[in-house]
Amino acid sequence: MIIDTHVHIGGEAVGFHMNEDMVLEAMDKYGIDFSVVSNSDAGEVDHQQKLLPKELQVSQEDALRRAIRFARKHPKRIGVAPWIKPLTQGITKELEDLISDNKDIICALKVHPYHSHIQPTDERVLPYIELAEKYDLPVISHTGHDEDDSPVHLYEAAKLFPKVSFVMVHMGLGTDNREALELLGKADNLYGDTTWVPMGTTIEAVERYGSKRIFFGSDMPIDGVDTYGHNPRGERSLYQDYFHELPKRISREAYEDIMYKNALRVFHLKDRID
Ligand SMILES: [Zn+2]
């Protein structure tokens, strides 16, 4: 079984082309059993960190409704991670109602410190983390190498909320992953994922901390339906390593933890997937 904990739809306003049909097609083609989907329509700033104009802003509630519609059609294959808008919106009753009414298909909360231009420990984000705690949802957060999205801020959030699980998506995108690897050893409720993370980093994480701390994730379909296979220029995807090389490099038990068992446990998916 494979569970991909980091899959997207939406995001046209910030230049992505990702939709429901692409997700399903890729899952069929590459043998992915379940995907945790967040809707990038809720991005708040563009790749230059500039606030998107009002006409391109989609509310966090509308973005969530689209993801919910998708998951409702495929409840055994698709789970939802609401993508929050702490910069331009804040928590609304409507958002909380959507989460509580759809708790059966919602399995995480998505924070994007880069596309929201905000740190995970900012006082505008903390109420969302309290909401995640209330509904027993892990917090999955993009991490990179800028002021807002540096992994250390997610570590700080993990220290503030010891009962909430936090996932450092990308283990610090655009870095050598060293900082994220060190931080994994400093908070038991801090996790990493494999999204654009070289296999060597994942193997080192397993050697240092065991196999319970990393989830398989990919950003699919950010490079198209063949994100798992190759990019639009035809260059082999690093996820091929995860599918074909990693099983030879770590124990079967550790491999199963990373590819689905950790997600079953932390994203509370055991009852969802037959
Ligand atoms: Zn992503």
Image (tube, rainbow, N blue to C red):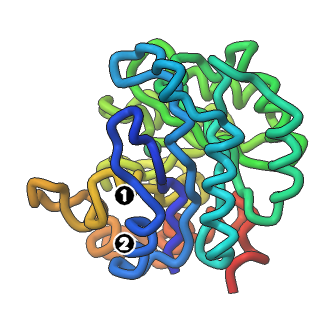
Q: Position of residue 12 (x, y in %)?
A: 39, 41
Q: Check disc 2 and give the amino acid type.
A: Ala
Image height check: is 253 above or below 166?
below
Residue 28: mark: none
In the rendered structure, the answer to whether residue 96 lies left or right of residue 215 reads right
Q: Position of residue 235 (x, y in %)?
A: 11, 57
Q: Check disc 1 and give the amino acid type.
A: Pro
Asked whether the viewer can see residue 262, the reply is no
Screen quadrant of the C terminus: bottom right
Residue 221: mark: 1
Asked whether the viewer can see residue 217, the reply is yes
In the rendered structure, the answer to whether residue 137 lies left or right of residue 177 reads right
Q: Position of residue 39 (x, y in %)?
A: 55, 47
Q: Which residue is at a point 67% across and 45% down the rendered structure image?
A: 82
Residues at marks 2 and 1 touching, judged by CB atoms closer than 8 Å:
yes
Label 2: how many Cα within 10 Å (few below 14, some 14–19, many 20+): some
The image quadrant that residue 129 belongs to is: top right
Q: Which residue is identified by label 2?
A: 26
Image height check: is 18 above or below 71?
above
103 or 14, which is in the foreground?
14
Helix, strand or loop under label 1: loop
Q: Which residue is at a point 41% across and 16% down the rendered structure image?
A: 49
* Image-quarter location of ligand 1: top left
